[in-house]
Image: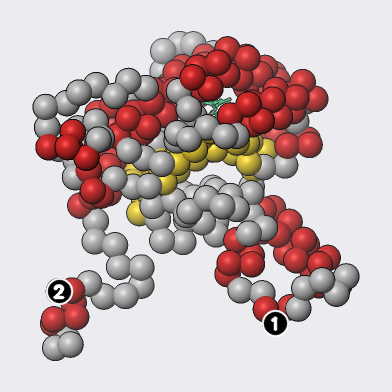
Amino acid sequence: MSRHLAATSNEAIGKSCPAELDPERIPAHVAVIMDGNGRWAQARGLPRVMGHRAGVEALKATLRLCSDWGVKALTAYAFSTENWSRPGDEVNFLMALFERVLQRELQALEAEQVRIRFLGDLQALPEKLQGLIAEATERTAANQGIHFNVCTNYGGRRELVRAAQQLATRAAEGLLDPATIDENTLAAELFTAGEQDPDLLIRTSGERRISNFLLWQLAYAEIHVTEVFWPDFNRQALLEALLDYQSRNRRFGGVDALGADALGS
Ligand code: FPP
């Protein structure tokens, strides 16, 4: 994650983001649904799993660009609770791929100050993968750079049910007064506890669905859908997503200054 000197005004505030972007309005947290790996491979006459392998390279490049451009957290949907229903060979390939990526990339993640965490029901993953996840989480926990969250065996509904169960258990034990439960109490029980909500959700391959991803956390995220298949997601595609984000007027349910003027307030 080199921070090349850039001869732009962005350099002045220490970010190496492209000149087209406003460095003051870089989304702090970007979430991605990496869709289209299988179709990318099939379009090339390759087995679907080759798309996942290429997808890892796109994810690494996206992580580096986000870090260089000043994004503070990147959360990627790597494996959903529904993905177990894929053919056994593909599921096995994905688990082995996650293991290989962790073994191969851990040193670089450490060196580049990335803090990696895996979000989801990790106990259902193969034991070897669980061990590698624990090691990577621990070895990068104190890193000061970008937060990289990999949602693995993750489902938004299951995450909310789990949070409700945890709160109900504490209430039943007399440790929590139900009347005091508010949005912060619930958010603190989610896998993303401590992370601010995503500002931008990027979904590749043209699908316009949330697909059970970060149901609570995406409440006010801007959504950018691109036709590009995930393995082809590159610097230009990320730049377009961020330019699209910067063109939006985020109101969080309120009105903007212009709207308020129109109402005479
Ligand atoms: C969706 O494409 C992609 C996935 C289910 C897997 C994505 C996983 C990675 C890129 C690896 C990340 C790994 C680590 C450890 C960081 P799809 O198969 O649904 O594509 P399709 O819609 O064309 O079938």
Kindly give the residue lying farthest to the right in the view shown. Answer: 173
Q: Is 227 situated above or below 216?
A: above
Question: What is the crowding at mark 1: few (fewer than 14 residues within 10 Å), some, or many (at least 20)?
Answer: few
Residue 179's disc is: 1
Looking at the picture, the colour scheme in use is secondary structure
Instruction: Tell me if I can see residue 103 in this picture.
Output: yes
Residue 221: percent from the left, percent from the top? 40, 55
- Whether residues under marks 2 and 1 lie with C-beta atoms below 8 angstroms apart, the answer is no
**Which quarter of the rendered picture does the C terminus lie within?**
bottom left
Which residue is found at the position 44% from the left and 18% from the top? 57
Based on the displayed image, in which of its 4 quarters is residue 141 positioned?
top right
Residue 258's disc is: 2
Residue 100: percent from the left, percent from the top? 62, 14
The amino acid marked with disc number 1 is Ala
Kindly give the residue lying farthest to the bottom in the view shown. Answer: 264
Q: Secondary structure at mark 2?
A: helix
Which residue is found at the position 24% from the left and 21% from the top? 4
Count the labels in the image. Answer: 2
N-term-proximal mark, 2 vs 1: 1
Q: Is 148 situated above or below 179?
A: above
Instruction: Tell me if I can see residue 206 in this picture.
Output: no
Distance between the Cα atoms at labels 2 and 1?
38 Å
The amino acid marked with disc number 2 is Leu
Residue 168: percent from the left, percent from the top? 79, 68
Q: Which is more toward the observer, 68 or 31? A: 68
**Which quarter of the rendered picture does the N terminus lie within?**
top left
Which residue is found at the position 23% from the left and 48% from the top? 24
Which residue is found at the position 60% from the left and 53% from the top? 193
